[in-house]
Image (cartoon, rainbow, N blue to C red):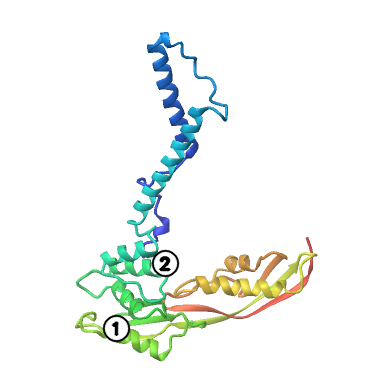
């Protein structure tokens, strides 16, 4: 799927700089003042040389107008973003999704809705494409965290692995039935397709590491480190997401820890697209305190 966050900033969205806009107003005022002064010597107008005074009316007016200009331009930027899938949020995103015949599910957050919109766009084909079947699976229930349609070898059977929002990622029988019903619908399944829905394979590994605390760290630091790791993986976990050693070590390095040396797993875990990695027990061996 396209990673919208990897796209360069749209050129149509202006980078706002209040100081630069204010300088433009001041330069225009000085230009007009000097032109009037040159054209009307009888007026005996002084050269403009008080721009650094806080009481200078021209500076006050310029600052006011430049601020108003920034507000207007910012509103224009917001209006542009509301029409771009990478930036639209809330009700703006709802309207943009509706253009692609996608509606927000009850309790669905913006990121998940964006993902389904992209899948809906990619899945518009006369054949049963992988994005299309994944879109149908994720649209069947908010409890589907991820889905992976795949084949085994040359078999014509299409398998759809479901990763749920449950703490262990295992899809319940009811959720599998809901997704299966959605995929087997006559207006969804291609006539020649045989679809089998199942829960994604869950691989569990225990975490073991030696850790050193800072001298002033309290005794609850290790518990907080474990909680930080579990919370981070819960947010990142998905089908096919590798469990990279440097990643999980960095999540353990919270305030109070001086050093973390991983023991198990001894290397990064490569996860197949149809499987999900889960953290088992977390053992942090306190080896002392150090700077």
Q: Is residue 218 visible?
A: yes
Among numbered discs 1 and 2, the one appearing first in the sequence: 2
Residue at far top of view: 42
* Quarter holding residue 151: bottom left
x 70%, y 73%: residue = 222
Q: Quadrant of the N terminus?
A: bottom left
Where's residue 210, x and y in %? 71, 72
Depth order, front residue of 265/95:
95
Measure how far apart labels 1 and 2 are at the Cα level.
22 Å
x 41%, y 8%: residue = 42
x 24%, y 82%: residue = 193
Residue 77 vertical placement versus 185 (above, below): above
Q: Is residue 213 left or right of residue 262?
A: right
Which residue position holds label 1? Answer: 182
Where's residue 224, x and y in %? 67, 73
Q: Is residue 269 visible?
A: no
Which residue position holds label 2? Answer: 111
Q: Quadrant of the C terminus?
A: bottom right
The crowding category of the residue bearing disc 2, from other C-alpha atoms within 10 Å (few below 14, some 14 to 19, many at least 20), is few
Q: How many marks?
A: 2
x 47%, y 37%: residue = 64
Where's residue 111, x and y in %? 42, 67
The crowding category of the residue bearing disc 1, from other C-alpha atoms within 10 Å (few below 14, some 14 to 19, many at least 20), is many
Depth order, front residue of 179/268:
179
Q: Is residue 280 left or right of residue 5?
A: right
Depth order, front residue of 90/3:
90
Residue 165, disc: none
Q: Secondary structure at mark 2?
A: helix
Where's residue 163, x and y in %? 43, 80
């Amino acid at each position: 799927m396209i990673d919208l966050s990897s796209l360069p900033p749209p050129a149509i969205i202006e980078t706002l700089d209040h100081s630069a806009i204010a300088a433009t107003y001041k330069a225009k005022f000085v230009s007009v003042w000097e032109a009037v002064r040159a054209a009307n010597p009888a007026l005996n107008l002084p050269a403009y040389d008080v721009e650094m005074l806080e009481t200078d009316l021209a500076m006050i007016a310029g600052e006011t107008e430049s601020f108003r200009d920034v507000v207007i331009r910012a509103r224009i930027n917001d209006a542009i973003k509301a029409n771009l899938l990478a930036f639209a949020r809330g009700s703006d995103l709802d309207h943009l999704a509706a253009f692609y015949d996608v509606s927000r599910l009850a309790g669905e957050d913006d990121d998940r809705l964006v993902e389904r919109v992209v899948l809906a766009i990619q899945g518009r084909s006369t054949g049963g494409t992988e994005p299309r079947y994944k879109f149908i699976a994720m649209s069947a229930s908010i409890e589907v965290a991820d889905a992976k349609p795949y084949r085994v070898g040359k078999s014509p059977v299409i398998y759809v692995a479901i990763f749920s929002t449950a703490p262990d990622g295992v899809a319940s029988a009811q959720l599998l039935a809901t997704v299966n019903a959605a995929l087997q619908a006559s207006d969804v399944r291609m006539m020649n397709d045989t679809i089998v829905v199942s829960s994604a394979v869950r691989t569990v590994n225990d975490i073991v590491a030696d850790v050193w605390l800072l001298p002033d760290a309290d005794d609850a630091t290790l518990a907080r480190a474990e909680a930080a790791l579990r919370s981070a993986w819960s947010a990142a976990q998905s089908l096919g997401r590798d469990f990279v050693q440097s990643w999980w070590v960095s999540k353990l390095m919270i305030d109070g820890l001086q050093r973390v040396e991983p023991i198990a797993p001894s290397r990064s875990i490569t996860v197949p697209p149809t499987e999900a990695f889960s953290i088992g027990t977390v053992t942090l061996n306190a080896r002392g305190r150090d700077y």
